Image: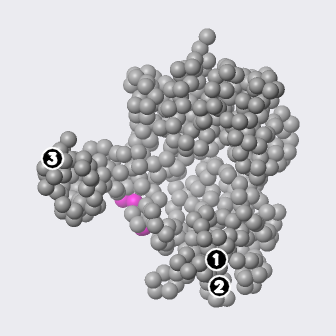
Amino acid sequence: MKSEQKLNLKKNQEISLTIEDFTKEGEGLGKYQGFPFFVKDTVIGDEVRVSITKLKKNYGYARLVEIVTPSRDRVTPPCPVARQCGGCKLQQISYEKQLSFKKSLVEGCLMRIGGFGKEDIEQKMEPVYGMEEPWHYRNKAQFPFGRSRDGRIIAGFYAGRTHSIIETEDCLLGVRENSTILQCIREHMEQYKIEPYDEANHRGLVRHVLIRKGFRTGELMVCLVLNGEVKALTEADVLVERLRGLFGDGTAVTSISVSINREKTNVIMGSRIVNLFGPGYITDYIGNVKYRISPLSFYQVNPVQTEKLYSTALEYAELTGKETVWDLYCGIGTISLFLAQKAKQVYGVEIVPQAIEDARANARLNGMDNVSFFVGKAEEVLPEQYEKHQVYADVIVVDPPRKGCDTVCLDTIVKMGPKRVVYVSCDSATLARDVKYLGERGYQVEKVRCCDMFGHSTHVETVVKLERKN
């Protein structure tokens, strides 16, 4: 590989590239006389002019200046602020090619990190579950409020790696009701001189607005994140009535609340919720299972694809009604309750106490008495239950955070010796690492399926079925 010194490259120099590959972050990779450059907003097959922004010893970064010849997989992003916002890194790529990219990403990690052969993985990879409609799929959005350079109150999203708000009230990934709700709140703020939050001086009242929708129920939640108490929200009762009157035809704002967050922090939600109207939650379904969703609840943002994801996990678990199942990193019990439909007994483990409260409430909501929940770290609860109480498992399901499973947790799984392990992953690198670890201890990968939960982003969910070898 040539170095930038030998090529005499300089910052701001314009060069021509052909994009040959993608990184897992969705950046295009092209080479200038063998020297690699990473370029955002490009597509494999693009011939482009770029301007060098940063140079390292063996690679560099560049900004797209001109698309000389577009790739056959390039499409025009329908969102007018796609490049500025940066939330949809793949919006310029055809949806079919996005699915192909995500499948290849998972395959690559399983081969490079997991040690699998190409033919072996290709035989075990099932077709990707893509979306029938890859727009307006997100049931949750959090919009920061601020002021534009000309002084207007605006809402939108932070540009990548900044806290500069890109003005947009109609994100094409979110539900269509978002823009109507934001306009209502913005007009109320303008009428009553309510200031949006200013991070620089820690002043202003309205920091964010959280909106959630139950796709099946049509119920909408609005939660205003305030840098102050509810009494500072002028004519809050007027705003409540305005929000309640926005929609009809089976869609309604049924929960309105305030989250108090007076800290100088990047964390959006405060820990204290004040209810203004409704029960303090909305409900929705995944398959036949009903869930209660509060402002602080974790709940999958794409309910249509979540049903496909959980159905795959249930299929891979091969439950007959006689099995004891452990669901680790269970959140509010979304997978646990899905499994409980066909298991004898399900035990869920989650470190967040509020999530377990929601999980238990969801179990009661569905009349399920064959599921129990534990608060704690999976790597602590599982060994304790196994060693002190001699619990066992026929099937163990794990859905860990991006860092993957703790080795203590994996070792306990191996000791318990379930017939099957179903691994649900949001990070293909840690998935490959953990699958290799289990493989070296007697578990063989049987099936792998990717599910696209986040169209136009680089993220992908994956489900792996592992069987214990005799």
Q: Are marks 2 and 1 in contact (CB under 8 Å)?
A: yes
Q: Amino acid at mark 3?
A: Gln
Q: Nearer the viewer, residue 58 or 34?
A: 58
User: How many neighbours does mark 3 have within 10 angstroms: few (below 14), some (14-19), or many (20 or more)?
Assistant: few
In terms of sequence position, does the residue under pointer 2 or pointer 1 come before the other? Answer: 2
Q: Which residue is mark 2?
A: 194
Q: Quadrant of the C terminus?
A: top right
- The secondary structure that dominates the magenta segment is loop
Q: Nearer the viewer, residue 112 or 138?
A: 112
Q: Position of residue 217 (x, y in %)?
A: 73, 55
In terms of sequence position, does the residue under pointer 1 or pointer 3 come before the other? Answer: 3
Above or below: residue 44 compared with residue 79: above
Above or below: residue 372 compared with residue 62: above
Q: Which residue is mark 1?
A: 206
Q: Position of residue 358 (x, y in %)?
A: 78, 50
Q: Amino acid at mark 1?
A: Val
Q: Quadrant of residue 187?
A: bottom right
Give the side of residue 223 with respect to residue 151, left or right. Answer: right
Give the side of residue 462 with respect to residue 159, left or right. Answer: right
Q: Residue at x 52, y 55 (%)?
A: 135
Residues shaded magenta: 76-81
Q: Amino acid at mark 2?
A: Ile
Give the distance between the C-alpha atoms of the residues marked 2 and 1, in whole angstroms.
Answer: 8 Å
Q: Which residue is mark 3?
A: 33
Q: Position of residue 315 (x, y in %)?
A: 64, 29
SS for callout 1:
strand
Give the distance between the C-alpha atoms of the residues marked 2 and 3, in whole angstroms.
Answer: 57 Å
In terms of sequence position, does the residue under pointer 2 or pointer 3 come before the other? Answer: 3
